[in-house]
Image: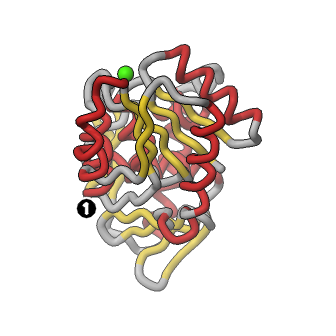
Amino acid sequence: MNVLIVEDETRLADALGQILKEEKHQVTVVYDGRDGLEYGLTGSFDVIILDVMLPYMDGFEVVRRLRSHHVKTPVLMLTAKDQLINKIEGLDSGADDYMTKPFEMQELLARVRALGRRTGDVTMDTMQYGDLELNMETMELSCGAKSLSLSQKEFLVLKILMAHKETIVSKEELINKVWGPDSDAEGNNVEAYISFLRKKIAFVGSKVQITMVRRVGYHLEE
Ligand code: CA
């Protein structure tokens, strides 16, 4: 399974990540609510493990926003012992399950597996922006009856832009998320992929544009 961990206690977050990797899951770890929302919005995870108290945006708000964007990825919320009262709020906000810290790793793994089993009917399988539709499984881009396949990097770049809609995404952010923070990719790598994507978007006959804001980044526009 592809699991997103959103937890600002870095030791706990990294330990969880390690254990899930040992169980052969793919794991992405982020440490604040804003990044959690951004990654969650891509819809590419089977389960999200989400802490409640997080910098920038709390876990309840993250789930609410995911659900309001129709991202149905199962969410397991983690909270400190003295926040039991929040259980109702957590489930009301759209979380699927709830665990109180400290917890047994075995129990957490069991709950993650149980949530993952629900994935078949709840994962978001397409993303939309304007007249464009992006298929998360096949990486196909379509507009009306026309469609074509994207390469993996084109897919990732477009997925991030679609998750941000009209909000600007910087070149650095794209490099970090698509090529990875340790890569030696540069601005002109991003420019090349933006140019491929523009051609493909035009090819399927979409009205969507990728607009560049000089020295800031890119965003989508209808
Ligand atoms: Ca926390």
Q: Nearer the viewer, residue 214 or 48?
A: 48
Q: Nearer the viewer, residue 122 or 155?
A: 122
Tell me the quarter of the image containing the C terminus. Answer: bottom left
Label 1 CB less than 8 angstroms from ligand 1: no
Q: Residue drawn 30% across and 23% down?
A: 82
Count of picture labels: 1
Residue 78: where, in percent of width, then height? 42, 33
Residue 172: where, in percent of width, then height? 45, 26
Q: Give the colouring mode of the picture.
A: secondary structure
Q: Nearer the viewer, residue 200 or 41?
A: 41
Residue 70: where, in percent of width, then height? 33, 62
Q: Nearer the viewer, residue 208 or 51?
A: 51
Work out whether 122 lies above or below 93: below
- The residue labelled by disc 1 is 222
Q: Residue drawn 57% across and 38% down?
A: 108
The crowd level at tag 1 (other Cα within 10 Å; few <14, some 14-19, many 20+) is: some
Q: Amino acid at mark 1?
A: Glu
Q: Residue furthest bottom?
A: 145
Ligand 1 image-quadrant field? top left
Work out whether 22 lies above or below 102: below
Residue 112: where, in percent of width, then height? 58, 47
Q: Residue drawn 53% across and 52% down?
A: 44
Left/right of residue 82 with respect to residue 144 in the rendered view: left
Is disc 1 placed on a helix, strand or loop? Answer: loop
Q: Residue drawn 58% across and 43% down?
A: 3
Left/right of residue 41 with respect to residue 90 in the rendered view: right
